[in-house]
Amino acid sequence: MAKTITFKVQAGGILRGEARVPGDKSISHRSIMLGSLAQGVTHVSGFLEAEDALSTLQAFRDMGVDIEGPVQGKLTIHGVGKQGLKAPEKPLYLGNSGTSMRLLSGLLAGQAFDSVLTGDKSLSGRPMKRVTEPLAKMGALIETTEQGTAPLHIKGRAGRLQGIDYVMPMASAQVKSCLLLAGMYAEGVTRVTEPAPTRDHTERMLAGFSYPVGKQGSEVSISAEGTLAATTIDVPSDISSAAFFLVGASIAQGSNIVLKHVGINPTRTGVIDILRLMGANITVLNERVVGGEPVADLQVTAGKLKGIDIPEALVPLAIDEFPVLFVAAACAEGQTRLTGAEELRVKESDRIQVMADGLQTLGVNAQPTPDGMIIQGGGIGAGTVESHGDHRIAMAFSIAGLRASGPIVIKDCENVNTSFPEFIDIAQALGLVLTCGQD
């Protein structure tokens, strides 16, 4: 039987110092996809060398793209142009990466060859109809399991996709990006309207590669009329990874940290807005724009957090950060209520149920609801919790140790490597008393 990784966190600790967390996962994925389809050589620095982004990198190598690196976050991508991908000799294995699978399904629907997308057990259970159904409206031919899950068997429909006007039923950057990538291969214009703002890295990066993208209110449009010109990308630090330390420094008395070069794209800063509403002390320093993406240094000092009703408008802007925001809520004074976040139930795990179970194990009054959670703030106890193989759950409970009454043991943590392989090193350097072992 495969060994599993267990984290053990000692109670207490103060976070102090400076850190630069790894590159943004969303931007790392997209830099490979668009760099591969560009004319010329694209240079990437700050690339996230974690399993999810490396799955995307390997998929494009399997389709004939010459990619040098990564070496210390640097990549050189020899673009093959929009029509230059070659048929892979075997199914493209995407590990745990939902972003890779959903975006590639759109990109591959318009190719001149057939392809198969597979993933690990967790990814094979995640819903794919949200992309395969609108792609079918464009003329794509994609077979899934009866449950609408991977493996995805994609029949190349080069020259036969049609642009559509699609109003998304839920706010999802992955669905939007998937349809925009398919729209680069479709006849006519593809228009996607989103019910609430979601991360816009795809649109920004397409513009960075000189590809025309239309934006009018909540509608984004694209057509096949365009080529991608190679560029240089410096990937900002991932705010989803920074979020663990934003919360950690906010809840541990005496903490004072600076997180360097963090991406503060306005479609991603919900975690900062929510923490500030709770009373966190977060200062944005040295704001600048790098490669079309806004970045800044974030200084965080400990604050006295209060429970809030989280505004639904902020939910899509912080969807990946809720596991650790639930920990902040457990440390706050009073009640925190989250609604409108049913999307959390179909992430790498059912993040509402798994976080509620773990918080209850640690003595927190956390009640799951169909679309969120109600948490009564107070203390965090000691105990053993299950991460269910979900990287963000594992890291969130690690941060909870800063305010726990005793040690917290977290099971099944190997998937932390999918998004944040340096988590343990950075956490220890800043002051979290965290050890890691194999079972």
Image (spheres, helix red, strand yellow):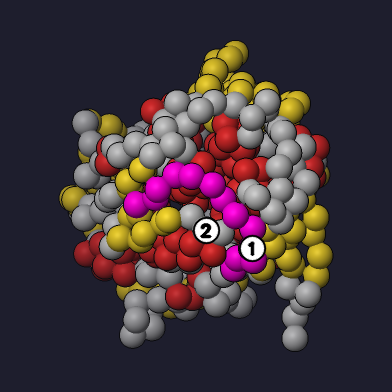
Q: Residue at x 38, y 83 (%)?
A: 145
Residue 31: x %, y % from top left: 57, 43
Question: Please, is residue 401 above or below residue 272 in the view?
Answer: below
Q: Is residue 375 magenta?
A: yes
Give the position of the N terminus as an image quadrant: bottom right
Mark 2 or mark 1: whose residue is earlier in sequence: 2
Label 2 with label 1: CB-CB less than 8 Å = yes
Residue identifier under label 2: 363
| Relative to 88, 216 lies left or right | left
Q: Is residue 426 magenta?
A: no
| Relative to 303, 20 lies left or right | right
Asked if residue 37 can be seen in this view, the reply is no
Residue identifier under label 1: 383
Kind of residue at disc 1: Gly
**What's drawn in magenta, residue-wise?**
374-386
> Quadrant location of residue 153?
bottom left
Q: Residue at x 56, y 50 (%)?
A: 380
